[in-house]
Image (cartoon, rainbow, N blue to C red):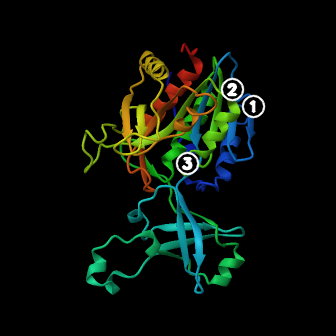
Amino acid sequence: MGVIMDLELLKRLSEAPGVAGFEYGVPELIKRELAGAVDRLWEDKFGNLYAEKGKGEKTLMMTAHTDEIGLVVKYVDEKGFIRFAKLGGIADHVLLSQRVFIHGMKRRLPGVIGCKAFHMMKEDERKQLITYDMMFIDTGASKEQLKSYGITIGTPITLDRQMTALENDLFVGKAMDDRAGCCALVEALRLADPKNRVVCVFTVQEEVGLRGATMSANAIKPDFGLAIDTTIAGDHPDISEHESSIKIGKGPAIVVADGRKDSLQGGLISNPLLRGWIMEVAEKGGIEFQLEVLEGGTTDAAAIQLAQVGIPSAAISIPSRYVHSFSEVISKKDLEESTKLLVRLMEEKIPV
């Protein structure tokens, strides 16, 4: 089975604004794409979007999160300069000089993240990392103008980014974590004729504590859980093979375990029977895949597995370079192979 990805959908998803807690239009975009392609669509009070397709004795829950890392207005000074807080895991060094959008209730306003000019810094200051609390956003507007645009404390802020094609079918854009997963799940739902009851959840607030997956798993009560996300590709300078053996263009990563650095606490140890079934389906379908133990991050699957009395769970991740940098690179091939695997999983009876 060949899969041809809708790259315009990936572009729309990547460029859509939706920081954690303010996902809004992303589920709406997905809802429009899935209209008529699934048996049932609904949302819960928290903002999770559910798409159900197929019937069977067992329920397979698949998730991809709609939220992206970003910022929120924390304070506006008398001259209109904006101080901000971070939503999700963001390294301070990737923020400086970035162009942003402040999503006011009445107007979306462009701005730029600034700090004290290099020429005005003392010698010791020039050698230090500039942390986010030393930065501010300049929109050119006064405090009064910002207020008239509906920009106040708590207004969400996203990065100004467009998806761009690179060489060799690579693409760079913001929020590939996890709009790439959303794209794969949408395409799989369009193509699949499920042999199980499949409930796909496009979750919210994953980046701030796996919150959407926690409540949706308790609501659905599935027999099995599977998270679709992105993961760290280590095939570039300054990452050694033993730190991350995952490579762009070598297929999706099937997660063995993930969690915190040095200890793998707080993450997922994937169910071995479920993981074995996923590998078997991939091999039978001629789908290239990679195995992964990831230190330093986890996915919705870590929350799903703890719901109810425990749900056997696993995770499939799309390799991505520069995760959480606002310029994440993925491969068209990996996206297509991931989608192909999801379709086959939907169409296979779960033997475990």
Considering only vertical position in the picture, is 263 above or below 103?
above
Considering only vertical position in the picture, is 30 above or below 139?
above
- Image spot of residue 339 (x, y percent): 52, 31
Q: Which residue is mark 2?
A: 53
Compared across the picture, whether 318 is left or right of 350 comes to left
Q: Which residue is mark 1?
A: 40
Q: Check disc 1 and give the amino acid type.
A: Arg
Q: CA distance from mark 1 to mark 3?
A: 27 Å
Instruction: Tell me if I can see residue 171 in this picture.
Output: yes
Compared across the picture, whether 237 is left or right of 135 comes to left
Q: Earlier in the sequence, mark 1 or mark 3?
A: 1
- Image spot of residue 266 (x, y percent): 47, 41
Residue at 68% of width from left, 41% of height from top? 49
Along the viewing direction, whichever of 265 and 9 lies nearer the viewer = 265
Q: Check disc 2 and give the amino acid type.
A: Lys
Q: Secondary structure at mark 2?
A: strand
Q: Which residue is mark 3?
A: 209
Q: Secondary structure at mark 1?
A: strand
Q: Check disc 3 and give the amino acid type.
A: Gly
